Image (spheres, rainbow, N blue to C red):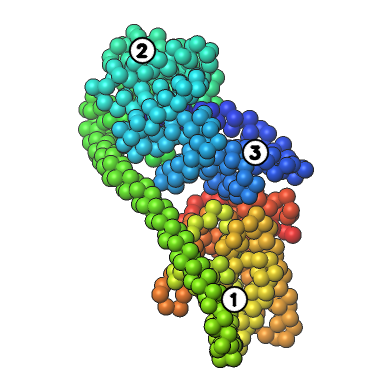
């Protein structure tokens, strides 16, 4: 069955958004239309944040991109509540992707913003979210500490909803050890009583279900059934109802009331099928298998277990596979079918090894997670220290400059020599600056000249464009080396002119591949539009160039082009022949947009589409398989 606490924490961490997400899904068209209307900038931030929530469950990547867009605008207009919510939404997106370090960092910044604007409710919510991450990483002590901090704030502001959430999460952590089951019940009961006082069905279902589960584990079936039936009643018709019904079925199986057990598991199965919640379907079938097995109906038990495996394998649901293999091995052993008994016993051992390895990886991952968090905090402290050093250096330079001005009358005696030398130095410096700016962005070049180093920087939202020439190999075989280089230079020079007009930064060329990015080193809100516009111009240029070369009987290039928008890290690499470069999953995805595109088309990701769809005509290609990236929503920009 599903890990006892996984469902608890998932529900309590995000239940405030679960109903909102459903309504947003129904109102997405309205939200998108709002973005086109004459909104104030603060209202636009709010709508972007609402859209981010609507994408949260189905498409966390798009949720992050939209939230990052809200963050950029909120920072620009100094809208702190919108900024905090955007950071929180980005953290939620990273949480769903399992990128916990990034989730924690976004939530830490969101917490600081909530603290600045004295939003205690926001502070409590962020603490609760971070506690869930530490719980998932196996750090119960840190999780409890954060949950207790959240509970303290919630009680100070008398926020019943947050109090119930914190109490439930604390009780959930205590369920990890049998020795603390009673402590778990203490907090679950407090949550249960408060849920009833505020008459919230969802919270009543959650808290009573938690109590039913813990009493079941303590072999107190009569008490467990009371709470589980109450949970099923509160959850009736929702996605959580199969969970309660399956636990009721397990209690009846243990009490040898097999017909009641089968009835409950069938109810859970039917609702799970209707809702298409596949993990619940697998768990319902395992419950049926266990009930049929205990009742002695071996054929029905085998059928239920095997059907459960069909649902569990695609989900990689190791706990469910373990229970199914265990059940099949027992049934075949009872039937003296030792060949099949051995077969499923071997599968059981394999999946147990997998579970053991997952638990081990979780413990090791917790150490690495804490290390990465501390490393990032150290980097921030070092960055702040460097800023202080630079501030001191600027003050020193100011004093030197003042001294120079004070002694300027002496320098006038040597004016003729000074101006002659200055002109020579100025010409040399101008040439040096021009060469440096041809290699690096202006902002990075200035930083390099001022301090001798250029620090790596993170950008929340950047649009990355990749191109690649089709027919490059065939054309190169028909051209002399000089002609080939001349043609590439002709195309790339035009690309350079196009991106310069649109304020886009050229990153690099690798053979017949060209890479550029908008939104850095100076952030802006127009980069998705700028990059898509540049992409359309590149495609148009290559098509005209192709027709011109065909008319002359010359070999030609064709172009594939892809764009994706998201976070990147940028900086200088190496110590010789400096190169400004960008890294991150956004770069990899943009490359996949190019390789998955078509000749003469601007292929963009779903994330970029959400940002530009109001200004460009696009055609949805559907969900396309991209190498090493899985299935991604892709669109062609038509104009």
Q: Residue furthest right?
A: 38
Which residue has dot 2 on it? 224
Mark 3 or mark 2: which comes first in sequence? 3
Q: Is residue 208 left or right of residue 428?
A: left
Q: Residue at x 45, y 41 (%)?
A: 108
Q: Nearer the viewer, mark 3 or mark 1?
A: 3
- Callout 2: helix, strand or loop? helix
Q: What distance separates the C-alpha of mark 1 from that of mark 2?
A: 69 Å
Q: Which residue is mark 1?
A: 471
Question: Of label 3 and label 1, which has the lower sequence position?
Answer: 3
The image position of residue 573, as x and y in percent, is 43, 69
Task: Place residue 218 in its image quadrant.
Answer: top left
The residues tagged by marks 3 and 1 sit, at their Cα atoms, a distance apart of 47 Å
* On-image quarter of the N terminus: top left
- Residue 200 at what x, y percent from top left? 53, 16
622 vs 255: above or below: below
How packed mark 1 is, by other alpha carbons closer than 10 Å (few <14, some 14-19, many 20 or more), is few
Secondary structure found at label 1: loop
* Spot occupied by residue 450 in the image (x, y as percentages of width and height): 49, 70
- Percent of width and height locating residue 273: 51, 27
Q: Which of the 4 image quadrants contains residue 86? A: top right
Q: Give above or below for 241 relative to 227.
A: below
In the picture of the structure, the residue carrying the numbered disc 3 is 46
Q: Foreground residue, 120 or 71?
A: 120
Residue sitting nearer the eye, 573 or 348: 573
Q: Residue placed at 37% from the left, 18% from the top? A: 187
Image quarter of the C terminus = bottom right
User: Quick check: marks 3 and 1 in contact, CB under 8 Å?
Assistant: no
Left or right? Give the position of 299 relative to 243: left
Q: Which mark is residue 239?
A: none
Whole-angstrom CA distance, mark 3 to mark 2, is 44 Å
């Amino acid at each position: 069955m599903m890990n006892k606490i996984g469902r608890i924490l998932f529900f309590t961490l995000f239940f405030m958004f679960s109903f909102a997400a459903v309504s947003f899904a129904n109102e997405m068209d309205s939200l998108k239309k709002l973005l086109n209307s004459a909104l104030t900038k603060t209202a636009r931030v709010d709508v972007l944040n609402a859209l981010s929530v609507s994408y949260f469950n189905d498409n966390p990547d798009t949720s992050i991109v939209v939230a990052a867009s809200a963050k950029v605008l909120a920072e620009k207009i100094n809208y702190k509540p919108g900024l905090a919510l955007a950071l929180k939404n980005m953290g939620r997106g990273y949480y769903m992707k399992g990128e916990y370090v990034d989730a924690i960092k976004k939530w830490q910044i969101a917490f600081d913003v909530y603290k600045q604007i004295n939003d205690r409710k926001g502070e409590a919510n962020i603490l609760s979210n971070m506690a869930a991450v530490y719980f998932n990483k196996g750090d119960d002590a840190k999780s409890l500490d954060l949950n207790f901090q959240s509970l303290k704030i919630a009680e100070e502001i008398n926020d019943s909803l947050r109090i119930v959430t914190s109490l439930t999460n604390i009780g959930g952590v205590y369920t990890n050890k049998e020795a603390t089951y009673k402590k778990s019940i203490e907090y679950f009961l407090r949550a249960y009583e408060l849920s009833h006082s505020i008459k919230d069905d969802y919270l009543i279902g959650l808290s009573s279900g938690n109590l039913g589960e813990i009493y079941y584990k303590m072999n107190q079936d009569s008490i467990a059934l009371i709470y589980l039936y109450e949970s099923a009643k509160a959850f009736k018709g929702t996605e959580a109802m199969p969970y309660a019904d399956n636990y009721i079925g397990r209690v009846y199986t243990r009490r040898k009331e097999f017909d009641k057990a089968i009835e409950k598991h069938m109810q859970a199965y039917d609702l799970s099928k209707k809702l298409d919640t596949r993990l619940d379907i697998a768990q319902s079938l395992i419950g049926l298998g266990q009930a049929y097995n205990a009742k002695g109906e071996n054929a029905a038990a085998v059928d239920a277990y095997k059907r459960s495996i069909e649902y569990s394998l695609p989900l990689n649901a190791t706990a469910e596979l373990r229970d199914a293999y265990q059940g099949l091995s027992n049934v075949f052993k009872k039937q003296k079918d030792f060949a099949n008994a051995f077969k499923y016993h071997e599968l059981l051992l394999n999946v147990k090894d997998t579970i053991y390895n997952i638990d081990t990886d979780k413990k090791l991952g917790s150490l690495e997670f804490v290390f990465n968090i501390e490393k990032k905090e150290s980097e921030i402290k070092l960055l702040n220290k460097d800023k202080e050093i630079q501030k001191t250096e600027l003050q020193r330079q100011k004093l030197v400059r003042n001294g120079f001005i004070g002694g300027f009358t002496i320098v006038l005696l040597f004016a003729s020599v000074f101006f002659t030398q200055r002109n020579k130095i100025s010409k040399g410096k101008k040439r040096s600056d021009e060469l440096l700016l041809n290699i690096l962005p202006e902002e990075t070049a200035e930083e390099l000249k001022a301090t001798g180093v250029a620090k790596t920087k993170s950008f929340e939202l950047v649009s990355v464009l990749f191109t690649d020439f089709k027919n490059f190999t065939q054309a190169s075989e028909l051209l002399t080396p000089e002609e080939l280089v001349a043609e590439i230079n002709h195309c790339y020079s035009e690309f350079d002119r196009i991106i310069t007009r649109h304020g886009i930064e050229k990153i690099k060329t690798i053979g017949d591949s060209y890479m550029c990015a908008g939104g850095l080193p100076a952030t802006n809100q127009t980069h998705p539009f700028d990059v898509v516009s540049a992409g359309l111009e590149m495609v148009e240029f290559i098509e005209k160039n192709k027709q011109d070369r065909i008319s002359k009987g010359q070999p030609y290039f064709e172009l594939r082009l892809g764009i994706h928008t998201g976070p990147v890290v940028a900086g200088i690499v190496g110590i010789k022949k400096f190169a400004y470069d960008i890294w991150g999953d956004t770069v990899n995805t943009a490359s996949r947009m190019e390789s998955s595109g078509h000749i003469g088309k601007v292929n963009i990701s779903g994330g970029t589409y959400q940002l530009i769809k109001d200004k460009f005509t696009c055609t949805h290609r559907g969900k396309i398989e991209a190498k090493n990236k899985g299935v991604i929503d892709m669109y062609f920009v038509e104009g």
